Image: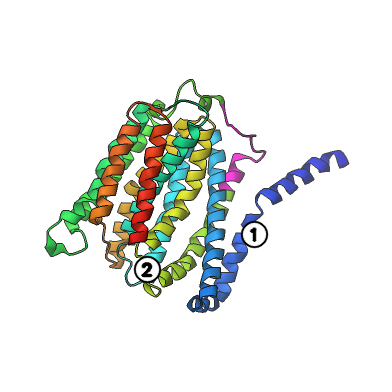
Amino acid sequence: MQHDTKPQKSTLALFAREERLLPVSLFAAAAFYAYGDTFAACLSHPVGLALVFAALFAIILGSVLSVVRHADELADRLGEPFGTLILTLTITTIEVVAISAVMFHGDNNSTLVRDTLFAVIMIILNGMVGLSLLLGAWRRPEQRHNLQGANAYLGLIVPLATLSLVLPEFQPAAYGPAISSLHQTVLVFMSIVLYGTFLLLQTGRHRVYFTQRNSREDHGPQHAPSAYPLLVHVMLLFAYMAPVVYLVDHLAKPIDYLVETIRAPAALGGVIMAVLVATPEAISAVRAAIADRLQRAVNIFLGSVLSTIGLTVPVMLAISHLTGHTITLGLGRSEMVMLILTLAVSMITFASGRTNLMQGSVHLTLFITYLLLILEG
C-alpha cells in the first residue's frame, strides 16, 4: 500500500505547489466581496492607494499568468493554431471585462477603449516583437517563420486598426467625439465577418500557414509534459478566470481614482489594462523566440493584436450601445503617426519570412518613443 500512496502524495504535493496562487486569488476575491467598501475608503490615502492597487494588480496578473500556463499546456496538446487561439480568446475575454469595469466606474473614461487598444498594439508590435526578435537573434543569425501566416495576420490588422483608430478622427465634426452609428455598424460587421473568415482559414484548409515546417515546433512540446488530464487544465483555466473577472472590477476603482482625482495622464488607465493583458502573452512569446520557436511567437503576438482589434472593438461598441456610454476611438496626431509607423515597420519586418537583430532593435526603439509620448502627456 505504501508503494501505491507515495506517487499519489507526490502528485498532490506537486499540484499544491503549482497551483498555490489559486487559493490566494479566491481568498482575495472573498475579502473584497466582504470588505470592498473598507478597501475603497483607503484610496484617499497615498499609502492605502498604493497597497490596494499593488495587491490587486499582483494577484490579477499572477492569476492571468496561471491562465496562460494552462493555455500553453492546451496548446502543446492540441497543436497549433488551436492552442494559440485558446490563449488569445481567453486574454481577450479578460481584456473586455477589465475595460468595461474601468469604463463604468468613471465619468471621463470615454477614451479608455482607444487608449487600451493603442497601448496593446504598441506594447505587442513594438515592445514584445522587439524583445522577442532581439533575444531570439542573440544566439543565432536569423530566425524563420511562415511568411503566409504573418501576411494573413497583417492583412487584417492593418485595415481593422485603421478603420478603428484612424478613420474616426476624420469624421464630420457634427458627430463630436463619438463615431457615427453607420460607422459603428460597418466596423462591427467588418470585424466579425473578417475575424470569422480568418478563423476558418486558420483552423481549416490553410492551417499550414500558421506552422513552420522542419522547425522545433514540429517536434513536440519544449517542456516536460503535464501529468494532469486535459480536462483538469481546462477546469483550472476557468477556476483562475473566475476571481480575475471579479477582482478586475475592484481594480477599476484605484485606476479611476488615479486618472480622475490625482489627474494622472488620461492614457494611464489604458496602459495599465494593456500591461495586464499583454504581459502573460509577452512572456510566452519571448520564451518561444528564445527557444527558436519563432512561429509560435509570431502566432502569439500577431494573433493577440488581431483578436484585440477584431473582437474587443465590436464587443465594446455593442456594450456602449446597450449602456449608453460614449466611446471615443480616434487617435490624436502623434499617436496616429506612431500607429501608422508601427504598422508599416511590422509589414517590413515580416515581409521576408526571416528576422534578425536589427529588426528587433527598430521595434524596441519605437516602443521607447511610445513611452516618452506617454510621459509628455
Q: Which residues are magenta?
A: 220-235
Relative vertical location of residue 28 with respect to residue 352 in this rendering, above or below: below
Say if residue 375 shows up in the picture.
yes
Relative vertical location of residue 142 with respect to residue 313 in this rendering, above or below: above
Q: Which mark is residue 248?
A: none
Q: Which mark is residue 23?
A: 1
Relative vertical location of residue 292 with respect to residue 16 in this rendering, above or below: above
Give the residue drawn at x 37%, y 26%: 353
Q: Looking at numbered disc 2 in the image, what kind of residue is underneath it?
A: Phe
Secondary structure category for the residue under label 2: helix
Image location of residue 152, percent across then percent down: 32, 33
Front residue (pair 285, 354): 354
- Whether pointer 2 and pointer 1 mark residues with C-beta atoms closer than 8 Å, the reply is no
Q: Which mark is residue 104?
A: 2
The quarter of the displayed image where residue 221 is located: top right
170 sits to left or right of 91? left
Give the residue drawn at x 70%, y 50%: 17
Separation (CA) of disc 2 from disc 1: 28 Å
Q: In the rendered image, which quarter contains the C terminus?
A: bottom left
Q: In the rendered image, which quarter contains the N terminus?
A: top right
The quarter of the displayed image where residue 256 is located: bottom left
